[in-house]
Image (cartoon, grey):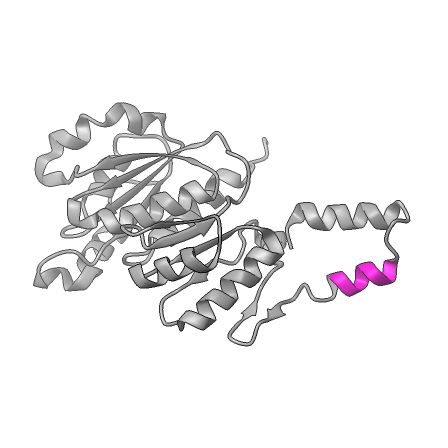
Amino acid sequence: MKRERLLELLRAVAAGEVSPEAAHERVARLPYLDVGAARLDLDRELRTGLPEVVFAQGKSDDELVRIVEAMMADAGRVLVTRVAPAAGELLSAAIAGGRFEPRAGVWSAGRLGPPSGRRVAVLSAGTSDFPVAEEAASCTEWLGHEVERIRDVGVAGIQRALDSIDPLRRADVAVVVAGMDGALPTVVAGLVSCPVVAVPTSVGYGASFEGLAPLLTMLTACAPGIAVVNIDNGFGAAALTHRILSTSIASP
């Protein structure tokens, strides 16, 4: 249930337009909605500010469509990640108004809310890191924030990152996606004052251990102000960025 819908329901009860019993019946199903294939946490946004997001991988076609249809019926919007091309085409054929972004592996409809006015820079160290960066960028846009994509700025050609300093310094958060040695977040955190969200990718040769090497590099970065999410977790970076931008810090 969206916050706005709950407030409308409470106002209707206060105005005498809806009985307390009818409101209770509506609110009583908040813990989850059982659609057979899944139990959907429809009140997650009320608790956390982030709605439940559908992870498509491993779901059958029927399960995926049923879940997305139920979430659309409840909120009129949905974000689906790790969507294979065939599943993206299936969702687009079954549900009107959706958008499929193949490089990001993201299918979505609607947006979380109005534009926040906050700016996020999403950097990919190499072209091979681009799919993970696109997942982060697409999810961040769905969550309501403006995204500036800065591509192919790995540390092997550091001048490329330095040439991007102006858009970086305009950003409220920088999401930095890198595989191989994973050094780019440290460089960025040494140039900007905003929080840096680092995303290691599984891109690299054997000794990168499918992303473990850049993960450890990012966790041991000498530049302060870096938060690290899991390997290839573009959505996790977007969710953390949204929480950073949505949380008001009270003045002392």
Residue 227 showing in the rendered view: no
Residue at left 12%, top 29%?
A: 159
Say how many tags the image has: 0
Rendered view: 31 above or below 4: below
Closer-to-camera residue (231/152): 152
Residue 234 can be seen, yes or no: yes
Q: In which quarter of the image is the C terminus?
A: top right
Q: In this view, does 65 lie to the left or right of 136?
A: right
Q: Nearer the viewer, residue 6 or 243?
A: 6
Is 25 contained in the magenta span?
yes
Could you tell me which residue is drawn at 28 percent across and 58 percent down? Answer: 231
Q: Give the residues in magenta.
A: 20-26
Q: Main secondary structure of the magenta part?
A: helix
Which x, y percent locates residue 80? 43, 57
Q: Does the magenta stretch include residue 198?
A: no
The percent coordinates of residue 26 (x first, y second) are 75, 61
| Residue 28: percent from left, percent from top | 74, 66
Residue furthest to the right in view is: 16
Q: Which residue is drawn at 28% across and 57% down?
A: 232
Q: Position of residue 209 (x, y in %)?
A: 15, 64
- The quarter of the picture where the N terminus appears is bottom right
In the image: residue 3, left or right of residue 50? right
In the displayed orientation, state which residue is furthest to the front.
Answer: 93
At x 81%, y 45%, the residue is 11
Which quadrant would residue 86 be assigned to in this image?
bottom left
Q: In which quarter of the image is residue 241?
A: top left
Furthest residue in direction bottom, as rendered: 36
